[in-house]
C-alpha cells in the first residue's frame, strides 16, 4: 500500500547434536492440556484505581480542542467494528492488570483474558530472543554465513558475496537484503505450504520467492522471507520442528502459558480463539488465516503472555534474568539503525525509551511496548483490521494515567475552509521522485485522500501552516501549498504535485 511505502519500517558450522545436549536443562515439554485452564484477568494490589482511570479516558487518536470527549470502550468497539480488545498493563516490571472487552466474534461468546489472538509480527521478537538464547549457549554463531546452518535449502545466488554474506544477525535485524514484505497467510482450511515451498514460491505458497535483492548491511528493509530462512536454519541445526524449539527456548521458560507457534493451531484450541474481522466488520473467511511462516507471523498468544515476555526482557536489562544475560540485552540495544533495534522501534529519548513492536495479520492488529528503565509497559491485541486505532487509544489512556511522555493523542484545532478552496485542491497528485500517485477527491463537502489500494481518508481542515488537514482516525496529516497555477501536497514527508 502506498501509505505504508511512505511510512517505511533484524561461524563455524556446528553439526547436529542430540536434543538433550542442545535444550536448556530447566525447560519441560509444554503441557498439552494447559489451555483448558481459565486464566482470569488480573488486578494487582493497588492497581484498581489506575485501571479505572485508564478505562475512563479512552480518547481518539486525534483530539479536536474543546470538542472531543472520552468514549467508553464498549462504545468504541461498536464504532470501530472491532469485536474484542484484550490488554495487559505492566508497572515497575510486574503485571499490574489485564482486561478484555467484547466478543470472540460478533454476537458470540464473551472475550476474556485467556482468549487467543494472532500476534502477527510479535512472533519475530520471540524468535529473536530464542535465537539469542541459543547464541548464549554457544550453539550458534549469528554472524556466520547462514548457509553454514542450512541443510535442506540454500539461499540462491544474489547480491550477497563471500565477503558480505547473509547472517542470522542480518535476518534478525532486517538488514539481510532479502526480498522485502510480509505474508498474507492462508484462510483456515486451505492447504499450507512447507517452509521450502514458501521460500521457493511453489504451490500452494502465495508469497514471493526469497532472493537477496539488496546488499546485506546496506539498510533496514522489513523481510518476512528472511525470517522464514532463519526458521529453516534453526530446524536444520537442531533437527526439531520450529514450534517445539520455540516452546522450549522461550514460551515455557518465559511463562507464556497459552502462547503457541503450532500451525495450524489444534482444533481443541478453537473455543479460545478470537476470530479475525475485516474493517467492514465481517469475519475473515474461516475465522482466521493460518501462517506456516511461524517465525515471521505464526504466534498465537494473549496480552498476558506478551507481557510476561516483556517483563523477562526487563529483568535481563537489570541483570536479574536467569534466561537472558545482561550482555545479550546490551548487545540488543547497542547499535540501533534508524531508530530500530532488531525490529523494535525505539520510541523516546534518554531514560524514557520504549522498545515497541506492532503486528498485524488478516483480521488482527496488536502492539506492545516497554520502558526497560522504569519497567512500565503495555500490550493490546484486537481481532479487527481496525484494531490499531483502538490500540492507540488504549496506549494514550495508559500514557496519561501513568504519566508517560509518549503515545499521547494528537491535539488539533478545527479550521473552516470554503467549498471553493476545497474544490480547488481536488485532483491527481504525482510524487515524481518516488513514482507514487494519489487522488484527492472532493465529496460530500469534504476532501478525501484515495490511495491506490482504494483506502479513502476523509480529511478535516485544521489550524496549521498553509492549508492543513488531518485524518481523524489515524492522525495522518496533509498540507497544501498553492502558488499561481501550481498546487503541491505534503504527505508523509514527501511532496506531490497536482497534475
Image: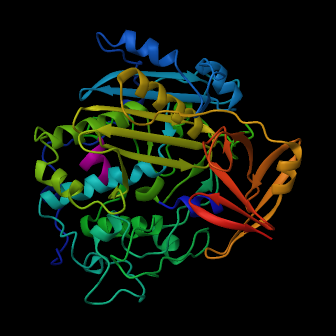
The residue depicted at 15 percent of the width and 78 percent of the height is 12
The residue range painted magenta reads 243-251
By secondary structure, the bulk of the magenta-drawn segment is best described as helix
Query: Which quadrant holds residue 202?
Result: bottom right
On the rendered structure, is 404 left or right of 198? left
The residue depicted at 29 percent of the width and 69 percent of the height is 168
Image spot of residue 74 (x, y percent) = 62, 19
User: As displayed, is residue 499 above or below residue 183?
Assistant: below
On the rendered structure, is 36 left or right of 26? right
Image spot of residue 40 (x, y percent) = 41, 18
On the rendered structure, is 288 left or right of 81? left
Query: Which quadrant holds residue 203?
Result: bottom right
Image spot of residue 84 (x, y percent) = 59, 29
> Which is more toward the observer, 360 or 70?
70
Image spot of residue 406 (x, y percent) = 40, 36
In this figure, which colouring scheme has been used for the structure? rainbow
> Which is more toward the observer, 211 or 486?
486
> Which is more toward the observer, 289 or 67?
67
User: As displayed, is residue 493 above or below residue 394?
Assistant: below
Quarter of the figure that contains the N terminus: bottom right
Numbered label tally: 0
Query: Which quadrant holds residue 14?
Result: bottom left
The residue depicted at 46 percent of the width and 82 percent of the height is 213
Quarter of the figure that contains the C terminus: bottom right
The residue depicted at 18 percent of the width and 37 percent of the height is 315
User: As displayed, is residue 12 above or below residue 412?
Assistant: below
Residue 464 visible from this viewpoint = yes
> Which is more toward the observer, 292 or 410?
410
Q: Residue furthest front?
A: 484
On the rendered structure, is 315 left or right of 247? left
Residue 108 visible from this viewpoint = no
Q: Tell whether position 129 is magenta.
A: no
Amino acid at each position: 500500500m502506498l501509505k505504508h511505502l511512505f511510512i517505511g519500517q533484524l561461524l563455524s558450522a556446528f553439526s547436529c547434536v542430540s536434543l538433550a545436549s542442545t535444550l536448556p536443562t530447566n525447560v519441560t515439554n509444554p503441557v498439552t492440556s494447559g489451555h483448558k485452564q481459565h486464566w482470569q484477568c488480573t488486578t494487582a494490589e493497588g492497581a484498581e484505581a489506575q485501571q479505572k482511570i485508564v478505562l475512563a479516558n479512552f480518547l481518539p487518536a486525534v483530539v479536536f480542542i474543546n470538542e472531543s470527549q472520552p468514549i467508553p470502550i464498549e462504545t468504541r468497539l461498536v464504532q470501530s467494528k472491532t469485536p474484542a480488545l484484550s490488554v495487559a498493563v505492566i508497572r515497575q516490571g510486574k503485571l499490574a492488570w489485564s482486561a478484555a472487552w467484547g466478543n470472540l466474534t460478533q454476537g458470540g461468546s464473551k472475550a476474556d483474558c485467556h482468549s487467543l489472538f494472532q500476534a502477527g509480527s510479535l512472533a519475530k521478537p520471540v524468535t529473536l530472543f530464542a535465537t539469542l538464547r541459543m547464541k548464549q549457549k554457544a550453539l550458534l554463531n549469528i554472524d556466520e554465513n547462514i548457509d553454514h546452518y542450512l541443510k535442506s535449502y540454500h539461499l540462491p545466488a544474489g547480491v550477497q558475496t563471500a565477503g558480505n554474506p547473509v547472517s542470522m544477525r542480518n535476518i534478525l535485524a532486517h538488514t539481510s537484503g532479502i526480498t522485502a514484505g510480509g505474508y498474507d497467510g492462508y484462510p483456515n482450511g486451505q492447504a499450507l505450504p512447507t517452509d521450502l515451498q514458501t521460500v521457493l514460491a511453489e504451490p500452494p505458497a502465495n508469497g514471493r520467492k526469497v532472493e537477496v535483492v539488496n546488499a546485506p548491511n546496506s539498510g533496514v528493509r522489513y523481510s518476512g522471507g528472511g525470517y522464514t530462512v532463519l526458521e529453516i536454519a534453526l530446524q536444520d541445526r537442531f533437527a526439531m520442528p520450529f514450534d517445539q524449539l520455540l516452546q522450549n527456548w522461550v514460551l515455557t521458560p518465559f511463562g507464556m502459558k497459552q502462547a503457541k507457534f503450532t500451525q495450524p493451531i489444534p482444533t481443541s484450541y478453537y473455543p479460545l480463539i478470537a476470530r479475525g474481522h475485516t474493517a467492514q466488520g465481517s469475519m475473515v473467511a474461516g475465522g482466521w488465516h493460518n501462517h506456516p511462516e511461524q517465525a515471521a507471523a505464526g504466534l498465537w498468544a494473549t496480552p498476558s503472555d506478551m507481557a510476561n515476555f516483556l517483563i523477562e526482557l526487563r529483568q535481563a536489562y537489570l541483570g536479574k534474568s536467569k534466561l537472558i544475560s545482561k550482555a545479550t540485552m546490551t548487545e540488543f540495544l547497542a547499535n540501533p539503525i534508524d531508530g530500530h533495534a532488531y525490529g523494535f522501534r525505539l520510541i523516546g529519548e534518554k531514560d524514557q525509551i520504549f522498545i515497541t513492536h506492532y503486528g498485524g495479520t488478516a483480521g488482527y492488529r496488536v502492539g506492545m511496548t516497554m520502558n526497560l528503565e522504569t519497567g512500565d509497559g503495555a500490550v493490546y491485541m484486537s481481532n479487527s483490521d481496525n484494531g490499531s486505532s483502538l490500540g492507540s487509544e488504549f496506549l494514550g489512556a495508559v500514557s496519561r494515567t501513568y504519566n508517560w511522555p509518549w503515545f499521547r493523542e494528537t491535539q488539533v484545532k478545527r479550521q473552516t475552509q470554503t467549498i471553493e478552496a476545497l474544490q480547488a485542491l481536488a485532483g491527481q497528485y504525482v510524487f515524481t521522485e518516488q513514482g507514487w500517485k494519489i487522488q484527492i477527491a472532493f465529496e460530500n463537502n469534504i476532501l478525501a485522500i484515495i490511495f491506490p489500494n482504494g483506502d479513502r481518508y476523509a480529511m478535516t481542515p485544521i489550524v496549521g501552516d498553509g492549508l492543513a488537514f488531518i485524518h481523524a482516525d489515524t492522525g495522518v496529516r496533509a498540507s497544501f501549498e498553492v502558488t499561481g497555477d501550481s498546487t503541491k501536497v505534503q504527505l508523509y514527508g514527501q511532496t506531490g504535485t497536482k497534475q
